[in-house]
Image (cartoon, grey):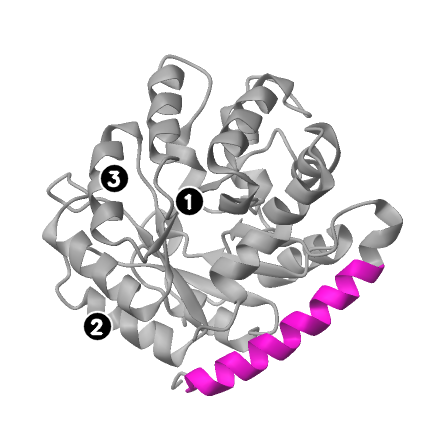
Amino acid sequence: MKHPTVTRRQFIQTTGIATAALATSSQNILATDEKPGLIIDCHAHLYGEDETKYPTRENPNRPPNGLGDLAHLKREMKANGVSHVTVVQPSSYYYWDNRFTADTSSDNSDSVVGIVTLDPDNPYSPEMLEYYVSQYNVRGMRSVPAKSGKLDDPGVENLWATAERLGIVINVLTKHDKHEEIKVLARRHPKLSIVLDHCLGLKLGETFDITLKAILDLAKLPNLHAKLTLIPLGTKEPYPCRDMHETCKTLIDAFTPQRCVWGSHFPTALFQPKVTYAQHLRIFTHELGLDEGSKRAILGETAYGLWFEPRK
């Protein structure tokens, strides 16, 4: 089946109008629950049911039966007052095949944008990125090191340069050992917005101190943003995961709320079974003790500016 063509003008008109309507709607819904008006989930992995149309990689990392599809995600969003979501290509399921992510984001452009994952060693990846951005509702790319083991690699560089030119966001997925390479790339592309997926994998344990130091160093760069999925991923405790609260607030102080975003890591049963979707959100709305301005920025305003605001 041929993919539908969506022009940039249609994307801007559709997403912009729907965004305003959903923001108003969510403000009315959330007023009774004392939550910020606009809530955007910046990290959901989505799984299709049709494995003929959208084949998986060999031995994929599957969510539990009945979980992880679009209907499940929409139920979680509605129940928790979440109006928008960025769907991040699950490479552990589809590898480099972004067709499901692209189709889903295009077919649900009133509330969804896509984040594709492309192979830095494929010379056609920059061209593919431009295609996804121009023809689908894709507003970002997840970046991983090349086969060389380096992030500062020609293949990665070409993708980052393309993303900067297109005005989309790079989500970088790596560990603390690549933090100096992130700095080099970020300085080379000062107009590129870069989000640290899962905050370099920060978690309690032997790598905690060195990882935290690396993140705080990266916070000095103005085009770096922190995706605050670290609490349920880094904790050793059940909800509300208090052993990670001060660390999270340290990162918020370092980046400022205007460079922090929240993501559910949906489906939580697969990726962070200690905490449900609702509990993860409640940590930020109630448990961390954030002021209202910080909540608004972290849970909605910053993400809107990165992924949903119409590009000029």
Q: How many marks?
A: 3
Residue 239 higher or lower than 159, as above or below: above
Q: Is residue 139 left or right of residue 149?
A: right
Q: Is residue 10 left or right of residue 174?
A: right
Q: Nearer the viewer, residue 75 or 84?
A: 84
The crowd level at tag 2 (other Cα within 10 Å; few <14, some 14-19, many 20+) is few
Mark 1 / mark 3, whichever is N-terminal: 1
Residue on which disc 3 sits = 183
Closer to viewer: mark 3 or mark 2: 3
Task: Give the distance between the C-alpha atoms of the residues marked 1 and 3, in whole angstroms.
Answer: 31 Å
Residue at 65 percent of width and 37 percent of height: 280
Q: Which residues are magenta?
A: 5-28
Residue on which disc 2 sits = 127
Mark 1 / mark 2, whichever is N-terminal: 1
Circle number at residue 61: 1
The crowd level at tag 1 (other Cα within 10 Å; few <14, some 14-19, many 20+) is some
Q: Nearer the viewer, residue 288 or 258?
A: 258
